[in-house]
């Protein structure tokens, strides 16, 4: 349920969804019990409530005739969806290769949710004998640069989170 309500202090109009115990004016911040607010219209359709509020605001500012020429919110939303150009046309006009963008999105969405550090740690856990080259290979297959992997291994050893003995790493 949607209701168009007004503030008795600053005369603002807004739409309230449901039946909250209290409502606060978005303009002046005054809070009152919902049942004490003046309800100009109560409806199940949000677009109808939006149309009523817009009509009241137009009448208040002497723009009744101009408002009559404007469609309903539902009609306007359809017009907005059909207006303008789509993303692909915009990107191509800007000189961006849309196929490369689609590939990047696919890699991103299909990629791992693990951070680079978590991938390096996972390599140390999953590999039988995780030497530097094996960890670098494992991590690079998952999109982690070699330079990051070698730095991460050094930092893990220095922080005490991992150990290195004769070229083989182990998480502690």
Image (tube, rainbow, N blue to C red):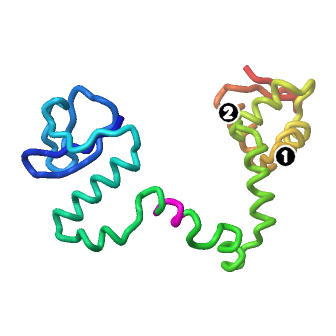
SS at mark 2? helix
Image height check: is 131 above or below 56?
Answer: above
User: Is 155 or 27 nearer to us in this picture?
Assistant: 27
Badge 1 crowding class, 10 Å Cα cut-off, few under 14, some 14 to 19, many 20 or more, is: some
Position of residue 41 measured from the top left corner of the image (x, y, whole percent): 25, 43
User: Is 11 or 58 nearer to us in this picture?
Assistant: 58
Circles 1 and 2, Cβ within 8 Å, touching? The answer is no
The quadrant of the image that shows the N terminus is top left
Image height check: is 111 above or below 92?
Answer: above
Q: Main secondary structure of the magenta part?
A: helix
SS at mark 1? helix
Marks 1 and 2 sit apart, C-alpha to C-alpha, by 22 Å
In the image, is 124 to the left or to the right of 37? Answer: right
Q: Quadrant of residue 2?
A: top left
User: Is 150 or 42 nearer to us in this picture?
Assistant: 42
In the image, is 47 to the left or to the right of 92? Answer: left
Q: In this picture, which residue range is highlighted in magenta?
A: 76-80
Badge 2 crowding class, 10 Å Cα cut-off, few under 14, some 14 to 19, many 20 or more, is: few
**Point 21% across, 50% down: residue:** 13
- Which residue was labeled with disc 1? 140
Image height check: is 100 above or below 160?
Answer: below
The quadrant of the image that shows the C terminus is top right
Position of residue 68 measured from the top left corner of the image (x, y, whole percent): 32, 68
- Which residue was labeled with disc 2? 158
**Point 64% across, 30% down: residue:** 159
User: Is 84 or 103 nearer to us in this picture?
Assistant: 84
Most distant residue in the left direction: 9
> Which mark, residue 166?
none
């Amino acid at each position: 349920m949607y209701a168009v309500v007004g503030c008795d202090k600053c005369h603002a109009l807004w739409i309230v969804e449901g039946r909250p115990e209290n409502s606060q004016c978005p303009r002046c911040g005054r809070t009152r019990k919902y049942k004490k607010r003046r309800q100009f219209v109560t409806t199940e359709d949000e677009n109808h409530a939006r149309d009523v509020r817009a009509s009241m605001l137009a009448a208040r500012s002497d723009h009744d005739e101009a408002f009559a020429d404007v469609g309903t919110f539902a009609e306007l939303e359809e017009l907005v969806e059909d207006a303008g150009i789509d993303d692909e046309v915009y990107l191509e006009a800007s000189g961006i290769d849309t196929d490369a963008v689609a590939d990047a999105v696919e890699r991103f969405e299909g990629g791992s949710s693990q951070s680079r550090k978590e991938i390096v740690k996972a390599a140390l856990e999953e590999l039988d004998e995780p030497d530097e080259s094996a960890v670098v290979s494992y991590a690079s297959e998952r999109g982690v640069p070699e330079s990051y992997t070698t730095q991460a291994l050094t930092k893990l050893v220095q922080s005490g989170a991992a150990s290195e003995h004769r070229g083989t790493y182990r998480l502690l």
